[in-house]
Amino acid sequence: MRRSVIQGIGAYLPEKILTNNDLAAMVDTSDEWIADRTGIRQRHVAADGETTADLATAAARAALADAGMPAESIELIVLATSTPDNTFPATATAVQAELGITEGAAFDVQAVCSGFVFALSVADNFIKSGQYDRALVIGAETFSRILDWTDRSTCVLFGDGAGAVVLEAKEGEGTLADRGVLATRLRSDGRYKEKLYVDGGPSSTQTVGHLRMEGREVFRHAVVNIAEVMDETLKQVGVPPDDIDWFVPHQANKRILDGTARKFGISEDRVVMTVDRHGNTSAASIPLALETAVRDGRIKKGDLVLMEAMGGGFTWGAALARW
Ligand code: ACO
């Protein structure tokens, strides 16, 4: 059975860091309020002129170096972002050009904070179908560009960054012992658009717009939806939560993340948390968290890793992979 094995991982964070105290000088907030409600202490912010494609390209180069593969061997680039450089073309094609790739296909996937799980699932299915052998899956965002920096209820939550993985087709036994993506499950429900959206766009306002969110409502739905899709994903392949070596959730809020882990009986020492240092980097948060845990030696070859995310739309999903 063809599997998409994760052969390399890379990440990029812009140099500039904005602490909670920096934000307290801009809006009526405090380090204590932000840290208590979200677990966030700081976030990275892209420099003037630094775009999502720049962040994505840096993460992609790092992932390729980690995999020991030349860029030209990549046949598919799926880039998850809600903050593209341009309305079109897709930011993935800018990354493709930067990497000097002229063959294969490159396109964006838009599922807000669930973007990485959606992109991973898309690439995995292309690989499983036999259409491509090697793919780059990237999550990259510059949410700092769509924040209303006068709205304390949203501007304190997000950060910029990018993460990428290289997938390669390998023949597995078709068992849970195979390395690679073992299961993915994607969901969406467009009735909830007003709870989390950007109030602009080319076809509606001809402006870029700002992020708007009913935080408490998003929180309520997140807890329910995430638990449901995690449960469905694990049941799809018959894996009990106890077997999970590492839980790598979308990093939106420490309280959501802790609550979900508790519900599934996943102990704190098996949860990868980066929200304190990165804030919510939307589609980039899972690959950034994965990279952190691989680099510091926690996630090792053969470990079972469960990812989940929920974002605007609403969209939500989960993915199970053996590293
Ligand atoms: N500093 C100080 N006070 C604040 C701040 C701030 N930064 N932001 C809001 N407040 C105030 C509010 O004005 C309100 O004051 P009031 O009671 O006088 O009206 C009070 O704090 C409580 O506000 P709530 O919004 O009810 O606070 P809550 O406890 O729900 O926390 C939060 C807000 C952190 C946003 C929480 O709801 C949350 O994490 N929600 C989920 C958000 C999320 O995960 N979003 C990402 C989804 S992924 C994607 O697709 C982008």
Image: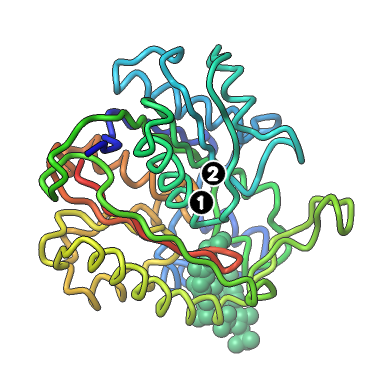
Q: Which amino acid does the dot numbered 1 rest on? A: Gly
For the question of whether residue 174 can be seen, the reply is: yes
The image quadrant of residue 180 is: top left
**Residue found at x 44% / y 68%:** 38
Disc number placed over residue 80 in the picture, else none = 2
Residue 182 image point, x, y percent = 25, 49
Residue 32 image point, x, y percent = 45, 70
Q: Viewed as shown, does residue 302 lie left or right of 135?
A: left
Please tell me which of labels 2 and 1 falls first in the chain: 2
Q: Viewed as shown, does residue 56 lie left or right of 88?
A: left
**Residue found at x 89% / y 51%:** 206
Badge 1 element: helix
Which quadrant of the render holds ligand 1?
Answer: bottom right
Residue 244 vertical placement versus 36 (above, below)? above
Quadrant where the image shows the N terminus: top left
Badge 2 element: strand
Residue 39 image point, x, y percent = 40, 65
The image quadrant of residue 155 is: bottom right
Q: Which amino acid does the dot numbered 2 rest on? A: Ala
219 or 78, nearer to the observer: 78
Residue 249 image point, x, y percent = 35, 59
Name the residue beneath numbered marker 1.
Answer: 115
**Residue found at x 41% / y 15%:** 73
Q: Residues within 10 Å of mark 2 (few under 14, many from 20)?
A: many
Quadrant where the image shows the C terminus: top left
2 and 1 marks in contact (CB < 8 Å): yes
Q: Viewed as shown, does residue 98 lie left or right of 202?
A: left
**Residue found at x 10% / y 46%:** 177
